[in-house]
Amino acid sequence: MKVTLMHEMQQRILQMLKTTAGGGYVSGEEIAARLGVSRTAIWKHIKALKDAGYNIVSHSRSGYQLKDSPDLLLPQEIAPLLATGIIGRKIIHFDEIASSNEEAKRLAREGADDGTVVVAEAQDAGKGRLSRGWYSPHSKGIWFSVILRPTFLPQEAPKCTLMSAVAIVRAAKHFNLDVGIKWPNDILSSDGKKLVGILTEMSAEMERINYVVIGTGINVNMSREDFPDDVKDIATSLSMIAGHTLSRVELFAEILAAMDDLYQDVEKNGFRNVLDEWRRYSVTLGQEVNVIGVRETFAGVAVDIDEDGALLIDTSEGRRKVLAGDVSIRPRTDKKE
Ligand code: BTN
């Protein structure tokens, strides 16, 4: 497990290189003087930045120049794009981890603050719903978990999944990507393939939430070959639908900003607005669906979600409410005249 907690000195050096007029050179002497350390110390920090993927060129007389930053989800890359109130105030980055949800739960038990984000470039034991796994290859997606300590009641927590889904659709729309939400937690492309999965976990007493962890996996820059054979035909990525690679840093900042906005609204006004926005983005409502419930499977038309976030289905035997389970949308059969 490799944690990237960047030295404060390195963050300040990066800041200086990024703000140099015209992206020119800054001398080692100037950096050393401004930071109050030796030139040898600066040289060591520059080397560490290069090892982390920053393309910094060194010139014996002119000094250092930043040519390129890696598209890694490093806190120092995200933070300047983010003006969030709660979510993302602290971002903990891992190069590789077993599961960001497991790490977030561990940190939450140790007292991590509301809004702490755990993000990994790769997971080797990513968790999906219903004890499934979640394939999370290095630097191809955004695999992250948000720790929340909300004031609402434990029975409201499942709606955090809807909140996260709405945040991701908002961010996707910002990049002109056409996506929709399948109840309760999948984000699909217009041809019905899965782009995003959300796994919300909670620790609570009867009347009080200790913490909620919302884990979200987004297939960003994966090509068809990157997916394991068993999901190749049912999964896709944002770059596949966009037709080009996306900046994971910009996308992640946009998602965290949207989540922060929604979370603050939820804490003030409850989930009313989240539910309304969810309805607008839904690809489930109005469709004929098969519901694979905990005990049984049945068919009907998905008509709405109620104030609990439960799916309401009109069946031949009347209206039914589905709180948990999987839904498959039945393809419309074109009737011939
Ligand atoms: C699903 O089955 O659709 C939910 C998938 C959730 C995957 C994400 S990736 C980040 C976070 N960490 C995990 O181990 N799982 C979630």
Image (cartoon, grey):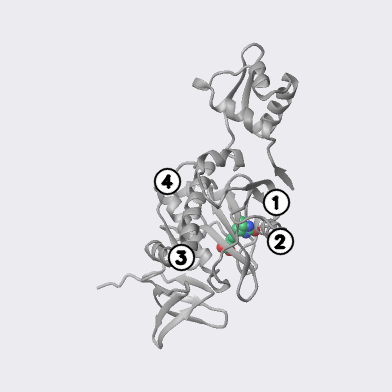
Report the residue marked by disc 1: 97
Q: Is residue 24 above or below residue 45?
A: above
| Residue 194: x %, y % from top left | 50, 59
Report the residue marked by disc 2: 109
Q: Which mark is residue 175?
A: 4
Which-is-in-front pick, marks 2 and 1? Answer: 2
Q: Which of disc 3 and disc 4 is earlier in sequence?
A: 4
Left or right side of 4 for 249: left
Please state which amino acid type lies under the numbered disc 3.
Answer: Lys
| Residue 205: x %, y % from top left | 65, 73
Residue sitting at 46 percent across and 66 percent down?
A: 270
Q: Which of disc 1 and disc 3 is earlier in sequence?
A: 1
The CA distance from mark 3 to mark 1 is: 28 Å
In this view of the protein, which residue sits in the foreground, 243 or 324? 324
Residue sitting at 61 percent across and 71 percent down?
A: 208
Report the residue marked by disc 3: 182
Which image quadrant shows ligand 1? bottom right
Q: Which of disc 3 and disc 2 is earlier in sequence?
A: 2
Residue sitting at 58 percent across and 48 percent down?
A: 89
Q: Secondary structure at mark 4?
A: loop
| Residue 103: x %, y % from top left | 69, 56
